């Protein structure tokens, strides 16, 4: 039986982060993952992360995956793929199944980072070809370059549903509707807004009744729901679609932890192990990190993995008490930052929040339809033009943990402050150079550069553009407003793209002056893909 000082089960963001910390401290580390490639969900994620610089904000998920793999290799971590851990047994022994044989290993410490599995919704026809999970859709698009379908119904308005809806648009699919049984959008408003501005209707208080079609999905019937989330007779609607994409939450994959005999808690988010502040379960030397310990964002999973890796190294004698406490506290402080704001754990499910932490009225339209109404934006100083020349307009209206815009502006035009959930403010006294780095760095694509002095009758709007093919200078297309409605003709003035923007093109369009505060998206005549 082979012995390692640290065994990590799962090569996703939490597992790799834990392995790196253990190996950096000097431990002999091995990681097992049942998949053919490491990285977990990271390599499906082409969007930019939120948070601050230390959370790898404004970096795309797959880039973070590449960074972690490089760190793990440099630290000397052994990663075994296509290796399924069948169980954890007394004295921290595990059994691993490969394609053609089984092996046993023992570990002084074990960190379980098996992640989570997608939930399903049961409805008439849910087993038909064409009903897929959001993760499967991401795999098809972002790993294999395959469209999941042509006309999609998205079920679920959490961050996963919103992010994948936008990626479906990028892949050239039509998202016919985004529905949710809940009364309000569950994910970040900036994610919803970038979907809504391309014309995707949000239907809250709706559920799917059945999938239509004999051998595959050829349509769907949805209906409004009552206060008990039951379909209301007479409210049924038919949608002409070929794919139903489900983004209805995740459940921790805690099976091996349950087998181990550690204490398990039944929480609203699923069965999770009881752990201390460092991820250690009720079995000494057995840790849990990432979604298996409670569903959160990938940024939080990476920090949780780091903390567990540090704790394992300390337990093994590789980190002195003072060093361990200092490093662990720094990581925990970083994690606390991500857990603040209106999406903090204590605020989940609340419907009584009416104001931001600064006292601005929360947008009711955003929660119901996915975009902030123009009248509502007047309450936010950063979203209103008040100076001549080029200047940033920031339509970020919720307290979410994110501040890359502040770091991106080298001239101090944008301020977030020490609390990263603060709504960004624009200092009108500072001169904006129009560099566009704030636009490119915004993970929610909520920043626009407006120049009302461009011409006598026209203004320019610079926005993030992530569709192919790229428009060319001089081409004329259509400007869309926040709800995706065409508002005016728009001429392409320039398109800038560099390594510094990590694949985000900065598109500058010219529109009639009356539409500079309305035009928030662009499509070429004939489409955006």
Image (tube, rainbow, N blue to C red):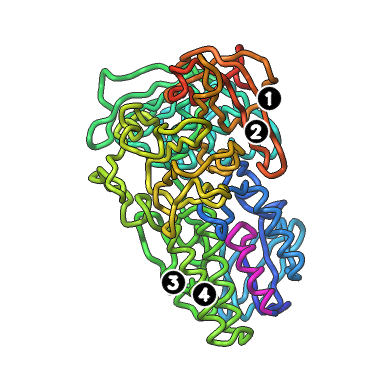
> How far is disc 3 from disc 1 in space, using C-alphas?
49 Å
Nearer to us: label 1 or label 4: 1
Q: Is residue 61 above or below residue 446?
A: below
Q: Could you tell me residue 9's position as x and y percent? A: 62, 65
Q: Along the polypeptide, which appears first: circle 2 or circle 4?
A: 4
Q: Residue drawn at (49%, 24%), measured in percent from left and top? A: 452
Q: Along the polypeptide, which appears first: circle 1 or circle 4?
A: 4
Quadrant assignment for the N terminus: bottom right
Circle 2/circle 1 CB separation < 8 Å:
yes
Instruction: Identify the disc placed on residue 275.
Output: 3
Residue picked out by circle 2: 505
Query: Does the magenta run of residues contain 360?
Result: no
Q: Along the polypeptide, which appears first: circle 4 or circle 3?
A: 3
Q: Along the polypeptide, which appears first: circle 2 or circle 3?
A: 3
> How far is disc 1 from disc 4 in space, using C-alphas?
45 Å
> How far is disc 2 from disc 4 in space, using C-alphas?
38 Å
Q: Decide which of 474, 147 is in the foreground and name it.
A: 474
* Tally of marks: 4
Nearer to us: label 2 or label 3: 2
Q: Magenta stretch? A: 9-25
Q: Is residue 360 visible?
A: yes
Residue picked out by circle 1: 470
């Amino acid at each position: 039986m082979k012995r390692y000082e640290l065994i990590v089960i799962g090569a996703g963001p939490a597992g790799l982060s834990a392995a790196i910390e253990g190996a950096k401290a000097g431990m002999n580390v091995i990681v097992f993952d049942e998949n053919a490639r490491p990285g977990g969900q990271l390599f499906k994620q082409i969007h930019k992360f939120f948070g601050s610089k230390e959370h790898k904000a404004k970096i795309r998920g797959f880039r973070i995956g590449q960074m972690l793999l490089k760190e793990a290799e440099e630290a000397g971590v052994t990663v075994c793929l296509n290796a399924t851990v069948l169980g954890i047994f007394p004295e921290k022994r595990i059994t691993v199944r490969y394609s053609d044989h089984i092996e046993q290993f023992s570990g002084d410490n074990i960190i379980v980072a098996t992640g989570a599995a997608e939930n399903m919704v049961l409805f008439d026809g849910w087993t038909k070809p064409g009903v897929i999970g959001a993760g499967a859709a991401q795999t098809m698009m972002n790993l294999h370059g395959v469209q999941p379908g042509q006309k999609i119904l998205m079920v679920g308005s959490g961050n996963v549903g919103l992010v994948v809806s936008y990626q479906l648009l990028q892949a050239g699919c039509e998202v016919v509707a985004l529905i949710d049984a809940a009364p309000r959008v569950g994910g970040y408003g900036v994610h919803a807004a970038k979907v809504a501005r391309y014309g995707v209707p949000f239907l809250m208080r709706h559920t799917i009744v059945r999938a239509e079609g004999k051998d595959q999905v050829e349509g769907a019937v949805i209906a409004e729901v009552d206060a008990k989330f039951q379909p209301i007779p007479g409210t049924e609607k038919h949608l002409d679609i070929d794919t139903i994409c489900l983004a209805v939450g995740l459940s921790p994959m805690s099976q091996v932890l349950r087998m181990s005999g550690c204490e398990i808690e039944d929480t609203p988010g699923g069965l999770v192990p009881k752990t201390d502040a460092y991820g250690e379960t009720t079995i000494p030397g057995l840790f849990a990190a990432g979604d298996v310990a409670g569903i959160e964002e990938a940024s939080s999973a990476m920090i949780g993995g780091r903390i567990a890796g540090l704790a394992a190294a300390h337990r093994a004698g590789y980190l002195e008490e003072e060093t361990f406490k200092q490093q662990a506290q720094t990581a925990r402080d970083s994690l606390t930052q991500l857990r603040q704001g209106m999406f903090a754990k204590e605020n989940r499910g609340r419907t009584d929040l009416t104001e931001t932490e600064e006292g601005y009225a929360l947008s009711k339209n955003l929660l119901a339809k996915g975009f902030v109404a123009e009248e509502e934006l007047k309450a936010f100083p950063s979203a209103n033009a008040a100076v001549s020349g080029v200047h940033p307009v920031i339509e970020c209206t919720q307290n979410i943990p994110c501040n890359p815009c502040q770091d991106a502006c080298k001239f101090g035009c944008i301020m977030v402050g020490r609390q990263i959930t603060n709504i960004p403010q624009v200092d009108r006294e500072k001169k904006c150079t129009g560099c566009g780095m704030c636009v490119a760095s915004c993970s929610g694509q909520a920043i626009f550069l407006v120049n009302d002095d461009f011409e006598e009758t026209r203004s320019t709007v610079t926005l993030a553009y992530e569709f192919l093919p790229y428009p060319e200078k001089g081409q004329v297309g259509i400007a869309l407003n926040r709800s995706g409605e065409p508002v005016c003709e728009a001429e392409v003035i320039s398109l800038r793209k560099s390594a510094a923007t990590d694949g985000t093109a900065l598109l500058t369009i010219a529109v009639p002056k009356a539409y500079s505060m309305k035009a928030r998206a662009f499509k070429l005549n004939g489409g955006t893909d």
